[in-house]
Image (cartoon, rainbow, N blue to C red):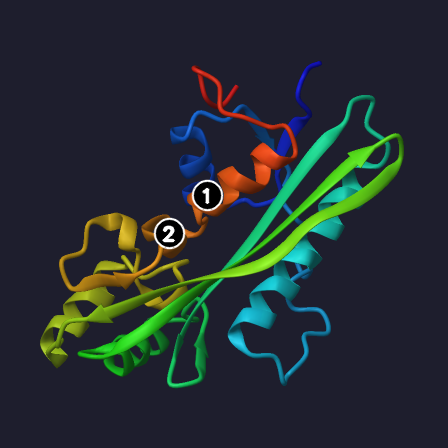
């Protein structure tokens, strides 16, 4: 029996790269603008928040797919950083990015990714998973001049916490947990969830 088709419910190029590098065949259908911002609960902790956001993305993409002719596995994710209880999403601008980097300098923080997986078959959507994965990191001490240069480079744009671990940065160190989780998708756990749903890597990766 053939495995279900995998759909990545995210426009993130980093998540797409992680899935492709792991050898999965999939297509991308991103959630529509505004889905993440609508009606978020203000009292959510980071783990609850990323799961809620992943579920929102998942629901929007499943609605877009309607009634597919073949079974689909839809995978959604969302990532935030957290330090001392403060949730750090993607910086709004240069000043916000600089403030995030200064807050993280020399300190331990955590990155959370919410993962949601649903099977869409015969017009019926069945939730298979919705959970958060956490990775603990420590950032080196950063000078004000270094932060200014980093912000000017634009390397912070579109990245939770203002940095991209995948960029090979020497100032961020994983202390515990999945490295790929910091990039945006905890591949160890994702592989387990997909395997349990009958979806496995192929030799050629993304179609």
Residue at 10% across, 78% down: 143
Residue at 28% across, 55% down: 165
In front of the other: 78 or 110: 110
Q: Secondary structure at mark 2?
A: helix
Q: How many marks?
A: 2
Q: Earlier in the sequence, mark 2 or mark 1?
A: 1
Asked if 23 appears above or below 55 in the picture, the reply is above
Residue 141 rendering spot, x and y as whole percentages: 12, 77
Asked if 137 appears above or below 31 in the picture, the reply is below
Residue at 19% across, 49% down: 168
* Residue 65 tag number: none
Q: Secondary structure at mark 1?
A: helix
Q: Give the distance between the C-alpha atoms of the residues marked 2 and 1, in whole angstroms.
A: 7 Å
Instruction: Name the quadrant containing residue 81.
Output: bottom left
**Which residue is disc 2 drawn over?**
183
Q: Are marks 2 and 1 in contact (CB under 8 Å)?
A: yes
Residue 87 rendering spot, x and y as whole percentages: 46, 77
Instruction: Name the quadrant containing residue 1.
Output: top right
**Which residue is disc 1 drawn over?**
15
Instruction: Name the quadrant containing residue 205.
Output: top left
Residue 66 rendering spot, x and y as whole percentages: 84, 37
């Amino acid at each position: 029996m053939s495995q279900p088709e995998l759909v990545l419910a995210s426009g993130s190029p980093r998540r797409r790269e992680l899935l492709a590098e792991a050898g999965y065949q999939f297509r991308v259908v991103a959630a529509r603008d505004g889905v993440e911002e609508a009606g978020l609960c203000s009292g959510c902790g980071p783990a609850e928040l990323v799961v809620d956001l992943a579920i929102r993305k998942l629901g929007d993409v499943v609605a877009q797919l309607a009634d597919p002719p073949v079974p689909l596995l839809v995978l959604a994710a969302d990532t935030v950083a957290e330090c001392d209880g403060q949730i750090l999403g993607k910086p709004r601008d240069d000043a916000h990015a600089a403030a995030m980097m200064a807050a993280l300098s020399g300190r331990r923080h955590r990155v959370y990714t919410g993962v949601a997986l649903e099977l869409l078959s015969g017009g019926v959507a069945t939730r298979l998973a919705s959970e958060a994965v956490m990775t603990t990191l420590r950032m080196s001490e950063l000078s004000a001049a270094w932060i200014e240069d980093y912000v000017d480079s634009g390397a912070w744009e579109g990245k939770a916490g203002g940095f991209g671990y995948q960029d090979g940065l020497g100032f961020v160190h994983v202390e515990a947990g999945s490295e790929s989780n910091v990039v945006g998708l905890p591949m160890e756990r994702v592989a387990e969830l997909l395997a349990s749903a009958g979806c496995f890597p192929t030799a050629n990766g993304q179609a």
